[in-house]
Structures are given as C-alpha cells and as structure tokens.
Image (spheres, grey):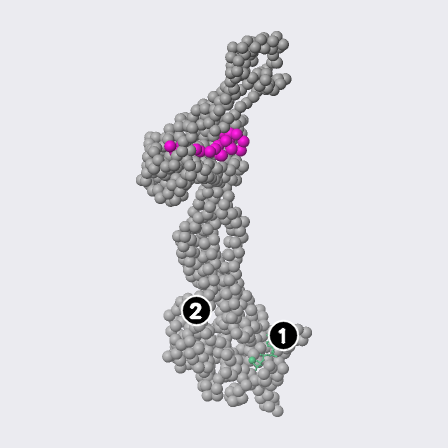
Amino acid sequence: MSTPLYELRGATRSFQMGNSTIKAVDDINVTIDKEELIALEGPSGSGKTTLLQLLGALDRPTSGQVFFEGRDLASLSDGELAELRLRSFGFIFQQFNLLSTLTALQNVEAGLAPLGVSAGELRERSLAMLAEVGLRDRAFHLPGQMSGGEQQRVAIARALLAEPHVVLADEPTGNLDTKSGADVIALLTDLAARHGTTIIVATHDAGLAARAPRRLTMKDGKLATDSKKTRAAAKKR
Amino acid sequence: MFYLSYLRSELLRRKGRTILTMLGLALGVALVIVITSLSHGLDQAQKTALNPLSSIGTDLTVTAQEEGYGGGAFANRMLETNLASLGKAGQHFSYDTFSAGTQPSFAQSQANSVSSISGVAKIATGLTLTVTHQEGKIPKITASFRTGGQQINVSGQTKRPSAADLAKMAACLAKQEKKSSSSTKTTATTGGQSSQSGSLSGQGQDQGGPGMFGGGAAMRKCMPASMKRFQKTITTRRQTLRKQVNTPQTNIKTSTYTIGGVDTSQTDMGLITKTQVSKGRFLSKKNAREALVANSYASSHKLKVGSTLSIKKTTFRVVGLVQAPLGGQSADVYVPLKQLQTLAGQKNQINVVLVRASKSSGVGAVEKKIKSALPSAQVASNKSEADQISGSLVTASNLAKSLGLALSIIVIAMAIMLAALLTLSSVAKRVREIGTLRALGWSRRLVIRQITAESLTQGVIGGVVGVGIGIVAAAVINSFNLSLSASSKVGNSTTTGGFRGAFGATQSAAQTTTSQVALHAPLAGSIILIGFALAILGGLLAGAAGAFRAAQLRPADALRQVE
Ligand SMILES: Nc1ncnc2c1ncn2[C@@H]1O[C@H](COP(=O)(O)OP(=O)(O)OP(=O)(O)O)[C@@H](O)[C@H]1O
Ligand SMILES: [Mg+2]
C-alpha cells in the first residue's frame, strides 16, 4: 500500500484563552488519500480553518501528529516547511489575500519566485497560468481594479503555478455571488483534475459539497462524519 | 528580477507612506549635518578666539607693570590741545596724539634680557598705542587772559630780637623819625585780580602790630640783619593763557583707535603675522609707509587694500586687511614698528615683548623664569588671555560643548526613532501580507530580506535627500554671515580707561576689544557620510526589526490578523 497523502493521529490544536482552553481541532484521526475533491463541512467555529492550517503546515498541532506523504510535519524545520508550502501546498483564501500593491501577474509570480527560476521563465509560466484562468488580458491590473471573482481566479492561478500536490481552499466562494462562485469552483475542479491535484475545500456550500467524492464534517473541533467511513460501513451491512 | 519589481511596486504604490518615512529620515539627516557643521564651526571660531596668542605664533607676552595705582596715571590723563598753536581760527586742523593706554613703554634693549632666558626660542617686539585723532575747524572765539604780576608780601622771622637789638633799633628809629617826621610808607599789596599775602610765623613770634614795626623805609633801615633777610616781596611770573570760550563742540571730532608697531623682521611672529592677512599682503621688511588694517576697522572706516591712511600728517598705504587676533595685543591699524616709534616720538621704545618657547611643554617654566628675571614685568600666557575672553561666542561654544553632544544624540535618536516607528507601523499593517507570503512558500529569511530591502531603499533615498537639505541649509547659514562676538579685556580687570579729549568732551576708549568672529557651518565629507550612514542605519534597523517580528509569527496567526 502506498503512503497516504495525509495521516492525522490524534491531531489537536487548542487555544488558551485566559482560563479556558478552546480545542479548535480536537483529537482528529483520519487518513486522506489522493482524490479529486474533498469537502470539509461544519458550522461556523467548528474548526475547519484551523484544520486546514494544520494540513498546510501554517500551524502546528498542540498534540498529536500530522503526517504529510509519510513525513511528520512536526519534525521538519522552518526552511523545510517553507519548501513544502512552496512546492506541495497551494492556498486559496476566502479574502483572496492578493498583495494589493502588485499586479495580477506579479501576484501570480510571487507564488513561484522563491523557487529561483529565471525571471523570463517565471513571467512566461505566470502569464500562461493567467491565461488558464482566463485573465491573460488582466495581467497588469491591480487587485483593486478587479472583481472578487477575478481576484479569486488570480489567487487560483497563484496557488496552482508551482503544481502543488494539494490545494487547500478555505471557503473560496464565501465572498462571491452564486454565479462567480460556481465559475470559480468549476475552474478549480477542472484545473485540479488536469494537474492531478487534490483539493481540500472548506465550504458552507451544500451544492459544492454534494459534488465531492469525499465529505468530512466537523463539529466542535471533532470529526463528526466522514463519507468514506459511512460508505464502508454501508457496504459491510 | 521579481524581488526588485516587488520592491519598486511596494514603494511606488504606497507613495504617501514612503514619502513620509523618507522625509522623516531626511529631516533627521539634515539636522545631524547642520548641527554637527555648526558645532564644528563654533569649534573653529572658538579656536581662533580662545587662542589669541598662538595665532600670532606666540606663547607668552611680556609687558611692563602698569604705573601708578590701577593704571590711573595713563588712563585718566587729560589731553589738552592748544588749538591756537595749530593755526588761525577757522582753519581746518587734524591732530593726532599718541598715548600708551595701559601698557607703559620701555626701552627696546630690555627685550634682550628676555631673549637670553633659556627656553625662549624667539622673541618679537611691539608697541601698541592709542591714537587720539582730532579733526575740525579751529574755533574763532579765543580769549586771552593776562595773569600773574601779583606781588606777595612775605615776612618772617625765626628769632625774637634780643634786648640789645631792640635798643639799637629804637635809637635808629628815633634818629630816622627826626629826618622825615611824618612820611610813612606802607607796602601796597596789589595784584591782577586778587592779592595774596602770606605770613611766615616764626617760633614764639608775636604778631607784630604796626606800632612796633610801622614805618616801612625807616623800619627797613633799622631792622637787624637777621630779620632783613626774611622780608621779601614776591612778584609772580607774568603769563598769557588762551582759553576757548563757548567752544562749538560739533565742529571738532575726536576719535580714538589703536595702532600697533609691528616688528617686520619676522613674518611668523609678532603683533600680527602673515597668517592673519585675509586680503592683500603682509608688511614688507623695508620699514616702508605701509599699514595693515583690521577687518572690523576697515569695514567701519571704508578702507580697502590700496587706500591711504593719514597718521600724524604722514601718509600710509594700506597693503592688507587682517583678522586681528583677540586679546591684549590686537590693534585696529598696524604699521612697521620703526615708523610708529618715529611718529609717536618714542624712539627705541616698545611696550610688549612676544615670546615663543622652544617647547610648548616648557611654556610654564619660561613664564616663571621671566617673572623672576623681571619682577616688574607682567607675563601673560595663552590661557590667561583666553580667560579674559567673554561674549556670545564663548556662551555659544560653552552651550555647544554642553549641549552639542546631547543634542546630536537626541536628534539622531529621534531620526532613527521616527524612521523606526514609520517602518514598524507600515510593517504592522502588512502582517497579513507577510502571512500570505509565508503561505505561498516564502521562507522567513526571504520575507525579512524583502522588507529590509524596502527600508534600506527608503533609507538611501531619505539619506540622499537629507544630505541635500543639510548642504543647502549649511549654505544658507553661511550666506547669513552670522557672527558671534568675543570680547577681551585688556590688562588687569580693574582698569577702566577714559581719555578726556579737549574741550571737556569725554571720549571713553573702552579697554575691552570686541571682535566679531564669523560663524561658519563647514561641511566635512565625514559629516555627510555619517549623516548618510545614519539614515541607512535607521531605515535598516527599523525595517529589519519590524520584518523580523512579523516573520516570527506563525503564518496561521499572521493570516488571522485583520488589517
Ligand atoms: N488564534 C486563535 N486564538 C483563539 N481562538 C482561536 C484562534 N483561532 C481559532 N480560534 C477558535 O477556534 C475555533 C475554530 O475556529 P475556526 O476558524 O477553525 O472555525 P471555522 O470552522 O473555520 O469557522 P468559520 O466557518 O466561521 O470560518 C473558534 O471557536 C475560534 O474562536
Ligand atoms: Mg474558517
């Protein structure tokens, strides 16, 4: 059996708030294999964002372990984690998080620049990626000059430029209207399929979740339901 | 290069913040440059002013002790001019009188005793006098008075006449009385306006009444020989005094200035030396009728190189302008020593010997030796001269000394703090951006490098602008021709001099020489470099500190930060 993409063993992330301890992610055990799309559901405050940050090595669990492609993230140095974020993870945020002083093209370039490719190659690949998200003609526009949907498409181009293994998207349609949200999701799933990338998306969008082959639902930091387990249990019966 | 284009975009698209940060740094740098330049300038001005002797190649000055008490003999001397002797009434006259001020003159040969003292490398002599110049029309109203011619009767006696004498006298008188029975003559006591009669009383002599010694001629004849000697009539000498009555004061101007006789045998030591020449040239060695004029005197009397100067009807050509040293030995006009000695009628007379010690460490010892060799001499050193100097320059430089360092440190600290605060606040606003970069795979090092490079660029540009502002500001200060005054008391401090001109016009020649020391803000390359370095350092430290702090955050926390 090949190593799974992720393996979480009792992963917990708690926050100390004065006297009380909030367990944003509470003892999660789950194995995630390469898949086209994985939906992360749950009510607000259930720990979806916190879990995505653990998966993307933006945060460390307070207890338990997170294995990515067989490597315990806790054992990696800051430099190795940065390398991992650069090459293996792509992030998409609800607020788009584009760098406001940079053009669409520069924003995309920022996602690959640390790799140290030549300026020409960087530009070429970035422009190609912008073309893929249908914004070739917007390359020299600033984020402030673009619609939310366009900005999120720039963010998608930026996240996918380094051809990551996983795209971690936190409510990518949360700030978009239905139409542009649907466009963004269509684009994201399409590209992910083409690049062989696994998308883990935290969402409140039931329609999007319904399309996902695997659905994980969180409640109070715990993993409440896992569609894979449910199916396996149904088969057993 | 992506990082450079990112940097450019970041600085250009946040113009307001960038300009503010750069201006803050620029202002700090400019202030540092101006303040350092100014204190540098003050230092220079102070050096010229506070080392008055060393500027003229001298370690010590030797002068004669003032005569009389407190110099009163000279200081309060009344100058009376007999105007009538200068020409006819209504004629224009110009008259110069030389006086020694507080420094009595002495023979030039006495300088040799100073030069022979061991440890003395070289000496120069000088004569500094005060010239009282009177000019105007001779007044018309001159009255003559004849005085004198008074007769004064003096009679006196030391011994009471003996009985025999008296008997002889009585017999004689009786005989005379018979000859001319009623002719009695009294010696008239007359005079011009008043009469004086004095009586010298002998010991035990009763006041003789006319009854006893009455009858002049007869009396004279019969007096004993010893008594005859004491009776005399004194007639005072007749003389004519001319006095001006109701003198018109407006017509006659009295001015005083100091003149220095310079030992022209040497150019590096003396009352004034070559180094003080600011325009023109130094006096030639030929004892020519040449003069050097102090800048301040030249500007107030509209003198230039090439102008002529009339001193006691002798014409001198101004060959140079000098920045006179402060202190006791400064003068308004300098001429060759021999010329001055001739003019003032003080042949071979000097009133100061300037001494250079062979070793600067030996000055104190030489000072002691001169004092013991010439107990009547006054010996002054650089330090004692400097102590006499006061004025705004001293105040300013004292201020600069005590405040300069503190001020510079405060300004530098403020500049760096301002830059740091601006950079820190700009970095704080970018925490989410930094979180995003980290999520994109930027390492901490890369994030810090990027933000530090931005601050560094701001620092360099701010530094360049600041250096520019600083240079312009220093130039503006220099163009204002600011000057500070430094006053030096001459001689001992209790002396207050006053020269009374003729006709009762009191002209006080203050015994304090005040000179204006120009304040410059000289720009040194090192100052500019330091200012520039400070701007860069300020920007760099602030940027690096802010970036480091932001990069230290977990990306998750940075991303959660709301803008
Ligand atoms: N840095 C933090 N400090 C303290 N508490 C935190 C922090 N981050 C998250 N939490 C808490 O952890 C819990 C989970 O938060 P999280 O953002 O993961 O929820 P979420 O499921 O993403 O919610 P939403 O759907 O609203 O985005 C919340 O109760 C939140 O208040
Ligand atoms: Mg969330």
Picture quadrant of residue B139: top left
Residue at (52, 25) in percent of width and height: B196
State the residue lying farthest toward the right. Answer: A19
Gap between marks 1 and 2 measured at Cα: 39 Å
Q: Which residue is mark 1?
A: A15
**Badge 2: residue crowd in 10 Å (few <14, some 14–19, many ≥20):** few
Residue at (54, 52) in percent of width and height: B406
| Left or right: B533 in relation to A29 | left
Q: Which residue is mark 2?
A: B15
On whether ligand 1 comes within 8 Å of the CB at mark 2, the answer is no
Which is nearer the eye, B456 or B340? B340
Q: Regarding ligand 2, which quadrant of the image does it lie in? A: bottom right
Q: Magenta residues, as a range?
A: B60-84
Instruction: Report x, y in % for residue B124.
Output: 43, 30
Instruction: Report x, y in % for residue B388.
Output: 51, 40
Residue at (59, 17) in percent of width and height: B211
Quick check: A146 above or below B52? below
Residue B262 can be seen in this image: no
Instruction: Tell me the chain of label 2.
Output: B
Instruction: Tell me the chain of label 1.
Output: A
Quick check: B331 above or below B20? above
Q: Quadrant of the N terminus of chain B?
A: bottom left
Residue at (52, 40) in percent of width and height: B387
The amino acid pointed to by label 2 is Lys
State the residue lying farthest toward the bottom. Answer: A237
The amino acid pointed to by label 1 is Phe
